[in-house]
Image (cartoon, rainbow, N blue to C red):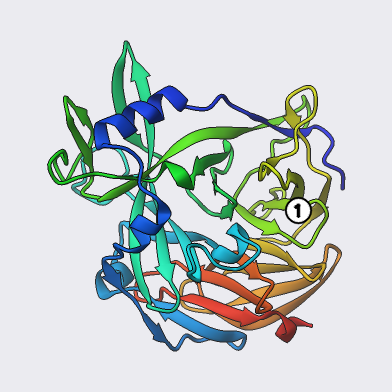
Amino acid sequence: MTGEGVHLTRTDENVVEIDALARLLGGRVPLSGVLSDLDRQGRRTWAPGRAVHEAFTFDAPDRRDRRWWPQGVTTSADASGTGRAEGRRLVVVAWYAKQLPGDPPGRQGARITLFDLDSRRYRHVLLVVPTMKDGVLRLSPLRVHAGGIVWFGDHLHVAATAKGFMTCRMSDLMQVPDEVAGERGAIGVEGDRVASYGYRYVLPVRFSYRAHAEEGQERLRYSFLSLDRGSSPPALVAGEYATRGRTRRLARFPIDPETTLLETGHDGRSLPSDMEEGVGHMQGAVVARGRYHVTVSRTPYWLGSVFAGTPGRWRERRLATPMGPEDLAYWPETDLLWSVTEHPWRRWIFSMRRSWFD
């Protein structure tokens, strides 16, 4: 397959809006500040699946929560070639919110979780969209499925399916101080008060990469994302979840290693360097040691599969993962694949030895 006709365009940055929110909240906070304020305790645990090497889970309220569902995963090994961020080994998980009976109109959007693998402590950070209308600052949640995330350098890319993907800067992290925090069950700006559904930290979207296709072509659905550090230049890998009759493409977009953003042509478009045919029901895909590894979910009650190999030459390893595997990330230093599962009471962050799939 070729990527002809499929491309992305980058929007302008929300500089004015983000700076206004930062002034209202007393400035930005460094990542180290958030990592020194992790408020929840996870734990190491056992998880089913033939390929599972190591597993962690969240606290009981997060394990059983039916509003928030884990989807995307990235790590400090994506963010930095050292495998550490602020000296810590981190897994970052993206969640999306479902609408529950009795909820006010509008889902609570998406959030990320910073999970320290050594202390097993973690914290949720709400993803937000600041806007300006007639000089008045407004705040809303980022309502996307967040099926995949990539943390590369200072940028965090969040999959937004048909829209493309959204990009935040980790240096834009902000704390909502108690003295300006608004109503816990709401989001928005009222005077000098900021409501953020009770989240102490927020991360604003800075810009987006919008999905396009030429006439007669179908836009790529950005169901999940991963980073291939092993290619030259590095590449963002995106792919499509697909049921019967829909496209199931895998695409690679070259990244400028200096900016950690997609390479862009003179016409402002970012084009895939190649596009391949994947498999049905893909939940995540990553390239490790030159081979694709793809997660496929087999219902909430049955162990998942991993397809390994190259497009057209896949090998399925059944019963490899726990129920409901989602996005994938690769940690080159340890040669481990990382994923997360979504279903209540069956929620794990887990790793798998890449060599198990050889």
Residue 77 is drawn in which quadrant?
Answer: bottom right
Q: Residue at x 73, y 25 (%)?
A: 268
The single residue placed furthest to the top in the displayed view is 134
**In screen coordinates, is 49 left or right of 14?**
right
* Element type at mark 1: loop
In the picture shown, does residue 122 fall above or below 170? below
Residue 352 in the image: state x and y as whole percent: 61, 81
User: What percent of the width, then of the height, locates residue 356?
Assistant: 71, 86
The location of residue 263, given as percent across then percent down, is 75, 38
Q: Residue at x 55, y 64 (%)?
A: 75
Which residue is at the front of the view, 255 or 34? 34
For residue 330, above or below residue 278: below
* Amino acid type indicated by mark 1: Pro
Q: In this view, does 258 lie to the left or right of 140?
A: right
Q: Is residue 242 above or below residue 59?
A: above
One can see residue 71 in this view: yes
Which residue is tagged 1? 234
Instruction: Tell me, yes or no, if residue 283 can be seen here.
Output: no
Label 1 CA crowd tier, 10 Å (few <14, some 14–19, many 20+): some
Where is residue 84 drawn, in percent x and y?
Answer: 55, 67
Residue that appears at 50% across and 86% down:
48
Left or right of 211, for residue 272: right
The residue lying toward the viewer, choosing from 41 and 178, is 178
Q: Nearer the viewer, residue 274 or 213?
A: 274
Kindly identify the residue that appears in the image at 30 percent across and 23 percent down.
137
Name which quarter of the figure residue 21 lies in. Answer: top left
Q: Is residue 318 left or right of residue 230?
A: left
Above or below: residue 12 compared with residue 179 = above
